Amino acid sequence: MGTSHSEAAARPHGSAPRRRGPVLERAILEAALEQLGTVGWNGLTMEGVAVGAQTGKAAVYRRWSSKEDLVADALRTGLPALDEAPDHGGVREDLYQLCRRVRAAMYSKPGYALRAVLHECDSEASERFQELILTGVIEPSQRLLRAVVERGIARGEVREDAAHEAVYDVMPAMMMYRSKVCGSEWSDAEIAEMIDLVMVPLLRR
Amino acid sequence: MGTSHSEAAARPHGSAPRRRGPVLERAILEAALEQLGTVGWNGLTMEGVAVGAQTGKAAVYRRWSSKEDLVADALRTGLPALDEAPDHGGVREDLYQLCRRVRAAMYSKPGYALRAVLHECDSEASERFQELILTGVIEPSQRLLRAVVERGIARGEVREDAAHEAVYDVMPAMMMYRSKVCGSEWSDAEIAEMIDLVMVPLLRR
């Protein structure tokens, strides 16, 4: 019994037209995010994702051998990209816009789902999803922060010895800390306050 | 059947002499910490703690109605006190000594146990133990940080507008972030670097 046979058998009559490659893949990843949002990590099954994506279980298993692989990919590809540093001509405005983008990633649907998964999954899977926060949110935002600081130095606005890992850690550290410890969701006003009271004094010449 | 009967029955022959009040209480709390270190949150039982403290299960239940209550008290009373701000005449040295004390609390036996419990317990108990980190480590260290900053302002060493919650959050945020994200255990050198590259530039006039 071939895989395509069982896949076709699992697909309801009158279902979506046959999709292949990236299109079907995207539908499966979106269905996985959808499932995470509704039934959570514990409730999510490969079968449920297949139904949500209007495909067969075999089509899911052909691409992802486990629920953990599938969810990791769904979260990774779903997170908003943090790929270009804001460039508004001043470090204060650039930092403000950068923080808003990081917040958008933290509170995106995949961002929420990622935090929820971390609460539900066992400690082995947890390591993998923690890694996803690191490579998907923290490292990109530190790269952008570095770009903003270096441009500020080039403009003569930022002190030269501020170009240091420890300094790049401050903003993500504050964002993580206040959402964890104070339950903050980082309003625009809180972001502006943090920039003005911490980042600007820390960076200025 | 009285409580003291079952307590006596559960106590092995030739056990510790009858202790009362604070002495017995301390023995039970220490046994609970010991159990956390060896069998973890999931392995810990009121019975096991009673055996460790050389007393009966009833003596434990008389004081703590649940494992959660007992563990919370054991962790709370076991954490090193953060009650007096270092005062060495300069903000740099004071911050350095303060960070070392916070580190000592984080990596004390109850500090380790607290983090381990958070990984093992369910989300309801987790909220309670998170609260313990807040009231037992974070809030006290912010209070001490405030004292150090205010003394620095009084000496004319620290800018006056640095006396702000957002500024007091930076050091604990960095400590939490780097231990969570980078797995840092905060060597003396890392503490000194953070003080020199972040806290001193942030605070100076």
Image (spheres, coloured by chain):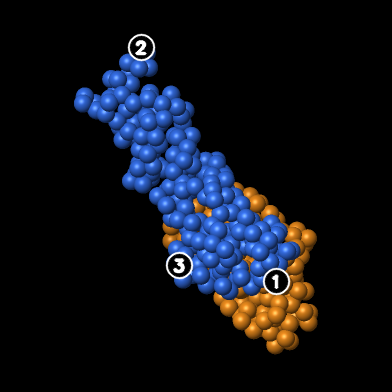
Chain colours: A blue, B orange
* In front of the other: A119 or B19: A119
Q: Chain of mark 2?
A: A
- According to the picture, the residue beneath numbered tag 2 turns out to be A1
Q: Chain of mark 3?
A: A
Residue A113, image x, y percentages: 42, 48
| Lower position in the chain sequence, tag 2 or tag 1 | 2
Seen at 61% across and 73% down, the residue is B167
| Lower position in the chain sequence, tag 2 or tag 3 | 2
Query: Which residue is at the far bottom?
Result: B154
- Residue type at mark 3 is Asp
Q: Marks 2 and 1: CB-CB under 8 Å?
A: no
Q: Label 1: few (<14), some or many (≥20) within 10 Å?
A: some
Q: Label 2 vs label 3: CA separation? A: 57 Å
Q: Label 2: few (<14), some or many (≥20) within 10 Å?
A: few
- Residue type at mark 2 is Met
Local secondary structure at mark 1: loop
